Image (cartoon, grey):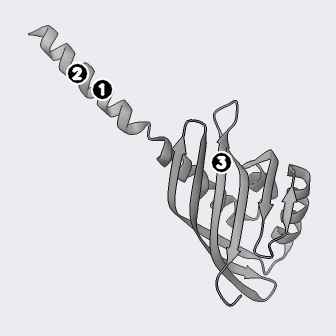
């Protein structure tokens, strides 16, 4: 009887671990945490989600490469008192140490409203933290 109870507990515990360790949920959380960092306008916190060799392309279609260039760009945007940005992840998928998130964004830059969709490619670093390696924002139609 003790062996049966031990086996049942082992199986239940294993199922719990399998459900708790969903890598897609982990990636969605990283995306949501990054959105919160953008909303807080804390440049260091925002940049902690960016890989050193990342590429980003904003709604204007221009590419920026490297953490320092991205820091310079976002420092200017986050310093603007009229700048607001929020986004919502709509889907995500993971394969080993790579993944993507996709969703929509909205906010304001200067006195102009902005909205559109985004896709971010993520890669886990050596410490196991998700870092954005490619981020692409596309404006909504008519913007």
Asked whether, in this view, residue 4 is left or right of residue 73, the answer is left
Circle 2 packing at 10 Å, graded few (<14), some (14-19), many (20+), is few
* Label 3 secondary element: strand
Instruction: Tell me the residue that label 3 is attached to.
Output: 122
Q: Quadrant of the N terminus?
A: top left
Give the tally of numbered discs: 3
Circle 1 packing at 10 Å, graded few (<14), some (14-19), many (20+), is few
Q: Which of the two discs, 3 and 1, sits closer to the camera?
A: 3
> Which residue is depicted at the point 89% across and 69% down?
76
Circle 3 packing at 10 Å, graded few (<14), some (14-19), many (20+), is many
Disc 3 and disc 1: Cα gap in Å?
A: 30 Å
Locate residue 46, reporting x and y percent.
75, 56
Asked whether, in this view, residue 134 is left or right of residue 73, the answer is left
Disc 2 and disc 3: Cα gap in Å?
A: 36 Å
> Which residue is depicted at the point 59% across and 47% down?
99
Q: Is residue 121 above or below residue 116?
A: above
Instruction: Tell me the residue that label 2 is attached to.
Output: 9
* Label 1 secondary element: helix
| Callout 1–callout 2 Cβ contact below 8 Å | yes
Q: Which of marks 3 and 1 is nearer the N terminus?
A: 1
Toward which corner of the image does residue 118 lie, by quadrant?
A: bottom right
> Which residue is depicted at the point 70% across and 69% down?
137
Locate residue 33, reporting x and y percent.
61, 54
* Label 2 secondary element: helix
Q: Which of marks 2 and 3 is nearer the N terminus?
A: 2
Disc 1 and disc 2: Cα gap in Å?
A: 6 Å
Instruction: Tell me the residue that label 1 is attached to.
Output: 13
Q: Which of 92 and 13 is in front in this view?
A: 92
Q: Is residue 69 above or below residue 14?
A: below
């Amino acid at each position: 009887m003790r062996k049966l109870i031990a086996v049942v507990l082992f199986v239940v515990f294993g199922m719990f671990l399998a459900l708790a360790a969903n890598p897609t949920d982990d990636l969605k959380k990283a995306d949501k945490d990054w959105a919160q960092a953008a909303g807080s306008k804390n440049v260091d916190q925002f940049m902690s989600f960016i890989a050193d060799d990342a590429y980003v392309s904003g709604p204007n279609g221009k590419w920026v490469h490297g953490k320092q260039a991205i820091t310079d760009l976002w420092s200017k945007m986050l310093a603007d008192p009229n700048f607001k940005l929020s986004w919502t992840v709509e889907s995500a998928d993971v394969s080993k140490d790579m993944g993507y998130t996709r969703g929509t964004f909205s906010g304001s830059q200067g006195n102009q409203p902005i909205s559109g969709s985004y896709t971010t490619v993520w890669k886990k670093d050596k410490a196991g933290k998700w870092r954005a390696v490619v981020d692409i924002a596309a404006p909504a139609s008519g913007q």
